[in-house]
Image (tube, grey):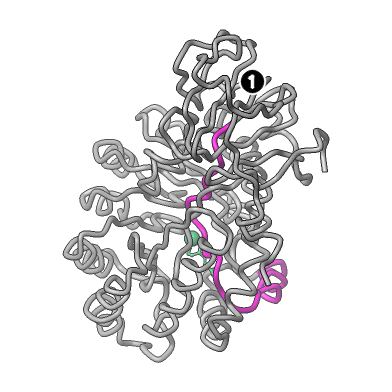
């Protein structure tokens, strides 16, 4: 029996979406829209066919249905560009340990951390992982996420990494949402490889990655380059394997210390470097020169009670595009709200509101190589957009702890309809 979240239940969004306001900087109009003027988005056959002032909609769209946007603010569908959404179990016990004074590194060295999620993930079947991840993804989607990245990295063995990536693909199909999969086999050293890091990296590069790529399960490759994970040299070996298979790379870079991983990733044309609290000025320049996106993860910063801020002013000055993501994971960011992350990016990292909104749309899309499909309202693209019952764009980053009652058009279908209030 099909479920209520099955996209087959959603009505097509085709028609003229009228009485809209367009969020500045997040659309390309076919005809200029004066500030404060009402706008229309025309959807035909699941794609955006026209964007412009609502009193200038071309006659050729006269026959289409009308959807009253009731003055709501339109943004592109949100993009959550860094998640570890598929895993077994949870790690609330570790949260308590950290509150009692243990650091993330100490917890990891004591056999907790990533490796404890690896145990739970290995024990779970593919169907169990799917059932556990489904409600998490539904929460993100209910807030307007239309594209999401899901990493492996809690299996750390071929069959278990495969299980995670297969679940990621299945989630995308079951819920009608764009899912980009990232292979993060080099997330932590599995316990059975203790003292044999090079052997594990060889397995990642020579066996796991090629097999998973052959099964069509990998869109990009990531590494956790850190003292408690993998060295710069090991990271480069994984990047070389990815390059050999024609895959883009990303990096968990300079989260706990400066390993100069960002400069390495930039040399490999990385889509993004993520976390980057300890990013150096050289790292910033390398990212700028390579057109690499800086993915900021305020959820992990907050949960770890970190105080070392990422170099926002330097990134801004260099013109490095900044994205913001939930980094949803059971250890350092058990967060299921991308808007909360936008709020924290403003409050903790001092992003401006326009920067935060670009971070969860345009720049998030670019961090996934999806900039032609997601992150911007423009004619020719698949119809992914969200209508928010707010007076000001700033409200999207201002409220926290509540869910806006939005209307969501995802993959050309009406996935949610607003009652025009706050839930
Ligand atoms: O992005 N930094 C490494 N990986 C995750 C945390 C994973 C975990 O602790 O389970 C992150 O924060
Ligand atoms: Fe992460």
Q: Is residue 86 magenta?
A: yes
Q: Is residue 107 visible?
A: no
Q: Residue at 60% across / 17% down in the picture?
A: 39
Q: Is residue 198 above or below residue 165?
A: below
Q: Quadrant of residue 67?
A: top right
Q: Secondary structure at mark 1?
A: strand
Q: Nearer the viewer, residue 217 or 359?
A: 217
Q: Position of residue 170 (x, y in %)?
A: 50, 68
Q: Nearer the viewer, residue 45 or 350?
A: 45
In the image, is 201 to the left or to the right of 166? left
Report the residue marked by disc 1. 21
Q: Position of residue 174 (x, y in %)?
A: 56, 64
Q: Nearer the viewer, residue 256 or 199?
A: 199
- Give the number of callouts: 1
Q: Quadrant of residue 24?
A: top right
Q: Position of residue 247 (x, y in %)?
A: 26, 59
Quadrant position of the C terminus in the picture: top right
Q: Nearer the viewer, residue 55 or 27?
A: 55
Q: Which residues are magenta?
A: 75-101
Q: Residue at 52% across / 16% down in the picture?
A: 52
Q: Is residue 122 above or below residue 349?
A: below
Q: Position of residue 279 (x, y in %)?
A: 39, 47
Quadrant position of the N terminus in the picture: bottom right
Q: Residue at 58% across / 24% down in the picture?
A: 63
In the image, is 71 to the left or to the right of 275? right
**Which residue of the protein is positioned furthest toward the front in this rendering?**
63
Q: Is residue 64 magenta?
A: no
Q: Is residue 226 visible?
A: yes
In the image, is 396 to the left or to the right of 236? right
In the image, is 112 to the left or to the right of 238? right
């Amino acid at each position: 029996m099909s479920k209520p979240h099955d996209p087959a239940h959603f009505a097509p969004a085709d028609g003229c979406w009228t009485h809209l306001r367009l969020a500045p900087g997040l659309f390309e109009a076919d005809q200029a829209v004066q500030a404060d003027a009402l706008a229309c988005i025309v959807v035909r056959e699941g794609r955006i066919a026209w964007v412009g002032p609502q009193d200038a909609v071309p006659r050729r769209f006269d026959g289409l249905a009308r959807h009253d946007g009731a003055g709501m603010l339109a943004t592109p569908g949100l993009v959550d560009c860094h998640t570890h959404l598929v895993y077994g179990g949870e790690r609330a016990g570790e949260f308590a340990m950290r509150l009692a004074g243990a650091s993330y590194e100490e917890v990891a060295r004591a056999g907790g951390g990533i490796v404890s999620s690896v145990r739970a993930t290995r024990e779970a079947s593919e169907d169990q992982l799917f059932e556990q991840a489904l409600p998490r993804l539904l929460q993100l989607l209910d807030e307007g996420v239309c594209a999401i990245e899901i990493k492996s990295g809690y299996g750390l063995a071929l069959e278990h990494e495969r299980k995670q990536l297969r679940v990621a693909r299945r989630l995308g199909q079951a819920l009608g949402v764009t899912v980009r999969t990232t292979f993060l086999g080099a997330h932590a050293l599995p316990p059975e490889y203790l003292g044999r890091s090079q052997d594990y990296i060889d397995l990642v590069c020579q066996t796991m990655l090629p097999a998973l790529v052959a099964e069509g399960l990998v869109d990009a490759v990531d590494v956790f380059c850190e003292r408690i994970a993998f060295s710069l040299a090991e990271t480069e070996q994984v990047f070389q394997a990815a390059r050999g298979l024609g895959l883009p790379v990303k990096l968990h870079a300079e989260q706990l210390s400066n390993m100069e991983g960002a400069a390495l990733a930039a040399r490999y044309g990385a889509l993004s470097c993520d976390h980057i609290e300890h990013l150096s000025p050289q790292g910033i320049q390398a990212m700028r020169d390579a057109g690499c996106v800086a993915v900021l993860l305020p959820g992990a910063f907050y949960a770890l009670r970190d105080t070392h801020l990422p170099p926002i002013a330097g990134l801004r000055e260099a013109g490095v595009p900044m994205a913001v993501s939930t980094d949803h994971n059971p250890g350092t960011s058990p967060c299921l709200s991308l808007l909360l992350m936008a709020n924290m990016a403003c409050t903790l990292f001092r992003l401006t509101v326009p920067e935060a909104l670009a971070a969860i749309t345009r720049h998030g899309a670019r961090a996934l190589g999806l900039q032609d499909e997601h992150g911007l309202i423009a004619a020719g693209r698949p119809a992914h957009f969200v209508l928010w019952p707010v007076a000001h764009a700033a409200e999207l980053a201002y409220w926290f702890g509540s869910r806006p009652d939005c209307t969501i058009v995802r993959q050309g279908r009406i996935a949610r309809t607003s009652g025009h209030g706050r839930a």
